[in-house]
Amino acid sequence: MTELAQMLDDFQPSPIGEIFTLANQLKAQGQNILDLSIGEPDFLTPDHVKQAAISAIDENHTKYTIVEGSLKLRQAISNKFKRDNGLDFEPQQIIVDAGAKPLLMHAMQAMLNQDDEVIIPTPCWTSYAGMVKLCNAICRYVPCPEDKGFKLQAGDLEAAITANTRLILLNSPCNPTGAAYTHAEMKAITDVLVRYPDIWILADDIYEHITYDGFEFCTPAQVEPRLYDRTLTVNGVSKAYSMTGWRIGFAAGPQKLINGIIKILSQSSGNPCSISQAAAIAALEGPQQLLAERAEIFCQRRDFLATRLNTIAGLSCHKPEGAFYLYPSCAGLIGKTTPDGSKIKDSKDFVKYLLTSHGVAVVPGSAFEYDPYFRLSYATSMETLEQAAQRIETACKALFA
Ligand SMILES: Cc1ncc(COP(=O)(O)O)c(C=O)c1O
């Protein structure tokens, strides 16, 4: 009999997909579902970006480009790193891929050997673990509790490092918590990493432009220039410019690493879509004012939803610095019984109850390796958030009846 690769026996698809599928089934049955499980901005791709893509088609930029992305795009990315992060990268130190997601995967393939350990602060984005497993490497989770703002502490990092540690993943602002590191907090982390020269640093900065209350974003290579030669700074246009469907991610780092990733791309995916590359140039070189305008709208939603959730018995919600997610604790609901008699044993049970009984889709903390919490995305209208908060309140109240 033909068999699948053994690796898949121990490989789980993204748990967010499970919620997505169930929510869609309920929608198809005619139920009114408020979806707060989505990880993409609800804004439209800006018009000037769409026009650039239309022009690229009209001008027949429809053929292969070089694998690492057109020089024009890499020059625009080089300018972006200088403008936003004060970092100097030559275009040849830059690589473009079909999203930050495949870029992270390809970067790990270029960095990791079998059984290497990867430090992942948790709560963490769902896809990191799968990528590490696809490289036959080992996840070394470091819990970052809520009372530390869900941020990695220098002492905990140091304690997690072993002779086999090859890579650390840093994601600020973070999916799912929204936690973002101040310069001083990042410096405490980079001060430890400076002392371990064999460790690569992967900075996932995809939510860079979504921060609030005057927060100043920073990234490891900028905070500690001595890490420049072993840091890959990953970013993209998906979240900042509402371009999730265009599939453009990019990264900059030391030449040796970039050359390694190019080798992998050249034998696997090839270049990212030529039309999307033209669109990304327009996004990066066009007006940047929309970033602050959109962040302001997200900020109003964060303030509303965090405040509202904190009035609900059984929930408590940390107010984060960035991204468009909240990560409330549902510890106060564990052990309660739903009106139809089932016990809420963990965040998964609560999320299922919320979706099937009250029509609100969110993601359980188990998807992010940190429980009992759940993730809500506020990348949706204020009206939807108000209705969702009302339904969540009703659902929680019913557990105390
Ligand atoms: C933390 C994090 N990194 C990377 C990505 C991937 O972004 P892209 O759309 O560029 O593949 C996401 C998307 O949800 C994310 O949340």
Image (cartoon, rainbow, N blue to C red):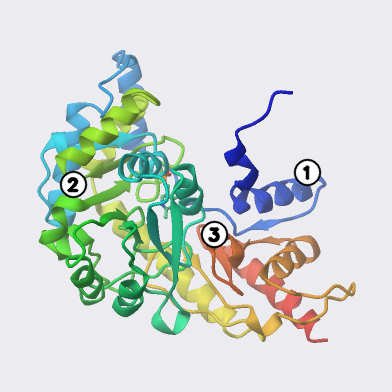
Q: Nearer the viewer, residue 202 or 311?
A: 202
Are circles 1 and 3 on residues that touch, CB within 8 Å?
A: no
Q: Nearer the viewer, residue 384 or 62?
A: 62
Q: Nearer the viewer, residue 343 or 105?
A: 105
Instruction: Name the residue that disc number 2 marks.
Output: 80
Q: Secondary structure at mark 3?
A: loop
Are circles 3 and 2 on residues that touch, CB within 8 Å?
A: no
Task: Pick whichever of labels 2 and 1 is earlier in the sequence.
Answer: 1
Seen as rendered, the residue at the extreme front is: 163
Q: Along the horizontal axis of the image, is 340 left or right of 216? A: right
Quadrant including the N terminus: top right
Q: Can you see residue 286?
A: no
Q: Is residue 21 above or below residue 362?
A: above
Q: Position of residue 330 (x, y in %)?
A: 63, 78
Q: Quadrant of residue 52?
A: top left
Q: Nearer the viewer, residue 150 or 212?
A: 150
User: Of the residues tagged 1 and 3, which is closer to the observer?
Assistant: 1
Image mark for residue 42: none
Instruction: Name the residue that disc number 3 marks.
Output: 381
Q: Along the horizontal axis of the image, is 276 left or right of 140? A: left
Within 10 Å of the Cα at label 2, are there few (<14), some (14-19), or many (20+) other Cα atoms?
some
User: Of the residues tagged 2 and 1, which is closer to the observer?
Assistant: 2
* Tag 1: amino acid: Ala
* Tag 3: amino acid: Ser
Q: Position of residue 321 (x, y in %)?
A: 36, 72
CA–CA distance in space, label 1 to label 3:
22 Å
Q: Secondary structure at mark 1?
A: helix
Q: Can you see residue 344?
A: yes
* Tag 2: amino acid: Lys
